[in-house]
Amino acid sequence: MPFKRVPQKFNASIKEVTIGTGDKALVLGGESVTPLYSFDDPIKNPPKVGIEVSDKGPNLELPELKKFYEGCKTIPDFAKRACTAPGASFVTLTLESADPNGENKSIEDCVKLAKDVADVVTLPLVILGCKNLEKDGDLFNKCAEALEGKNVLFMSCKEENHKKIAVGAVQAYKAKIGAESAVDINLAKQLNVVIGQTGVTLDNVVMNVGQSAAGYGFEYLVSTMDRIKSAALAQSDAQLQVPIVTPAGQEAWGVKESVASEADFPEWGNQELRGINMEICTATAVITAGANAVILKHPKSIETVSQLVAALV
């Protein structure tokens, strides 16, 4: 008996969220099928890949990365060059120098840098904070004010500071926010619910449901993402019908396999290539689990992952 495949399509769909403006505006979400199941139904907005630039600058000790950014002197220079990375659909500025436990750069200086970057980039802009709840809340609001009209996505918004960011960045200055939770479907849903209680509609929200590098324990993140997509589509859970954006590069370049030198572990091979491979493995895994966008650091990783997505959809 011949096999007859029945397409699996859902009546529900993921909400569309737009970042950026004009011809370069980027739409995330909108799908009504299991991740990458383009053979069941066309995927309106395939997963996107963004490139991350820290306000501390890229790691120029990596030869290929140094070559890509050759001639760049300032953070706006790096961000402008990042926009030329093959396959990059958006650029992310990470304001890690604002961390009170680190350099503690002032909010005024960070806002000026964000504005300078926004003035030169040619792709939609995403801004990541310093991971300090109080500082990020104030920082995002001031940046949103300075960048009003550019439709910037600010990540991350957590339960502890969601009111300040949702009201200050979204309602006051029409920005977008990323709801960050800790690898738990119930926490992800609860955060979306309380954000909605501030009056912010979910077409202004994306989710970061957790991040981890491929390896031991990674399956917990992937299974959580899979459960979220299943609840959103198969169970029509409106509170989870939100695009997922995962800063995969931060974790991938933070593990020992990526940062250990070749001198210390010669049997592991080239350090930069190890980091690229870790970033690619992590990014492709979270995309197949349901991420609508990933944020990576290395141009080679970005090119490879974007080519893979294009081949699959």
Image (cartoon, grey):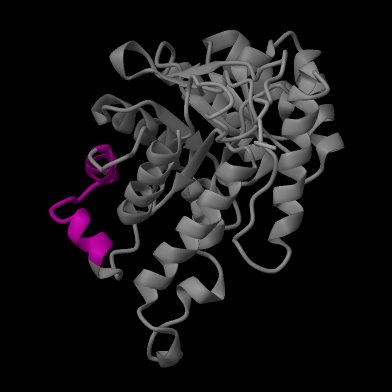
Task: State whether residue 257 is above or below residue 197.
Answer: below
Q: Inspect this view and state whether residue 104 appears.
A: no
Q: Residue at x 50, y 49 (%)?
A: 96
Magenta span: predominant SS is: helix
Question: Is 96 or 30 nearer to us in this picture?
Answer: 30
Q: Does residue 71 appear left or right of residue 301 in this picture?
A: left
Q: Residue at x 23, y 62 (%)?
A: 66
Question: Is 160 or 230 nearer to us in this picture?
Answer: 230
Q: Does residue 194 appear left or right of residue 252 in this picture?
A: right
What segment carries the magenta color?
Answer: 64-83
Task: State whether residue 288 is above or below residue 23.
Answer: below
Q: Does residue 58 appear left or right of residue 275 in this picture?
A: left
Please identify the quarter of the rendering in which residue 187 is found: top right
Place of residue 286 in the rendered image (x, y in percent of width and height, measured from the top left) = 59, 47
Please identify the quarter of the rendering in which residue 181 is found: top right
Place of residue 219 in the rendered image (x, y in percent of width and height, measured from the top left) = 72, 57
Q: How many marks?
A: 0
Q: Inspect this view and state whether residue 229 appears.
A: yes
Q: Residue at x 65, y 45 (%)?
A: 132
Which residue lies most toward the front here?
1
The image quadrant where one finds the C terminus is: top left
Place of residue 157 in the rendered image (x, y in percent of width and height, measured from the top left) = 67, 32
> Would residue 90 be counted in the magenta stretch?
no
Question: Is 131 or 236 nearer to us in this picture?
Answer: 236
The image quadrant where one finds the N terminus is: top right
> Would residue 69 be counted in the magenta stretch?
yes
Task: State whether residue 177 is above or below residue 35.
Answer: above
Q: Residue at x 59, y 38 (%)?
A: 291
Q: Does residue 17 appear left or right of residue 11 in this picture?
A: left
